[in-house]
Amino acid sequence: MSISTVPSSTVPSSTASVPPLTEAERELLPTDDEVAHYEEHGWYLTKKLLTDEEIDELVDASERFYAGARSRTLPLRPPRLAYWEPGDGAVQRHNDYIHVESDPIARILRKPLIGAVAARLAATQRIRLFQSTLIHKPPVADEPSNIVPWHFDKHYWATCASERMLTAFIPFHDCGPRMGTITMIDGSHLWKEIGREDSMTKHFADRDKSDLERVLAENAAYNNAQVRKVQMEIPKGHMSFHHCRTYHGSGPNRSDRPRRAVSLHLQDGDNEYRRFELSDGAAVTYNHDALVRRLPDGRPDYADPEYCPVIWSDGTQNFTTELGGAALG
Ligand SMILES: [Fe+2]
């Protein structure tokens, strides 16, 4: 399937305001103790943030997407785009930029409550979407592509200035070990990293899997830490969050149903592009860099509302986005 160019006018502009939470939604925010747990352990299992109807719509909309439905398509295919197509067969499916290509899915991913939970965890006032990936693990116990080896997301976000970014893993059903749920390495977001290797900025799909086991073991030893694996048992409508430096991975799907999910990557309001060079002086790029608008100084704008919309803003609920302007304050 090819990705065609569409006029930018067909892309909806950013939300002009984020509605406040209801009283019932405020009850679903992490408590102070839960925020402290996240700071100590690097992960958090939420309360029920999505209704059964919202989850069922995610399933239906994802099936329509897999059948070819698009609200729009990306204007170009950036260099490292994960983009499953039917011709790829019964491998693990990853489709980046699902919030751009599917409005029905984006509407649910942009639910302010999700952003408000993220803002509490990241201790920030504003949350923007950074990336979202629709995931489908086929129920094939020995399918090698279903294994997601240990990694942490910041490795892929070297061009992001923030160290507080975080990810929500949102399954579309009850999700436990039998389905190959996400597994966190407890407390690993606090580890110091052994001398950074250029290869760590590569996406895990491009890297040697045994090498990643080695990296995890060596980093744990370097920190005098035990590798403690915590498998997330996530009821339908709940989700897990993890810090951008928390090692995580996931195993085979041994159930008789596909494991469906979205990986929703979020950035705090202060995040912005920074130049990051490999040892040979080459600048690392992220897929956004080929898509988003530019800041006045020429850097990619990670606050471009077409790709990185604000989903939560504390305090002043109203804000404006000016096309071609600098990042939101
Ligand atoms: Fe990840």
Image (spheres, helix red, strand yellow):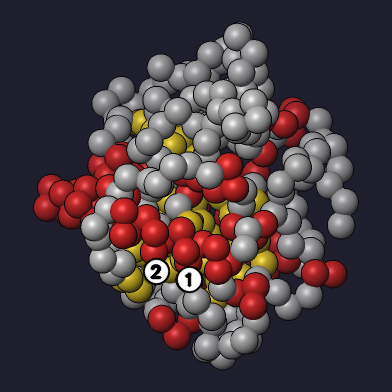
Find disc 2 in the rendering and name its residue.
183
Task: Report x, y in % for residue 159.
Answer: 54, 31
User: Is the CB of mark 1 within 8 Å of ligand 1?
Assistant: no
Eyeballing the image, is 123 above or below 72?
above
- Up-down relation of residue 294 to residue 142 (above or below): above
| Mark 2, other Cα within 10 Å: few <14 / some 14–19 / many ≥20 | many
Q: Can residue 231 be spotted in the picture?
A: yes
- Nearest to the observer: residue 305 or residue 272: 272
Residue 267 lies left or right of residue 238; in this view the side is: right
Residue 224: x and y in percent read 24, 57
Q: Residue at x 49, y 32 (%)?
A: 160
**Which residue in the rendered view is the most extreme toward the left?**
33
Residue sitting at x 32%, y 45%? 192
Q: Position of residue 229 (x, y in %)?
A: 33, 71
The reply to whether the residue tagged 2 has its Cβ within 8 angstroms of ligand 1 is no
Quarter the C terminus occupies: top left
Residue 9 — which label? none
Q: Could you classify mark 1 by the number of other residues whose Cα lies within 10 Å: few (under 14), some (14-19), or many (20 or more)?
A: some
Kind of residue at disc 2: Thr
Identify which residue is drawn at 44% across, 73% down.
Answer: 181
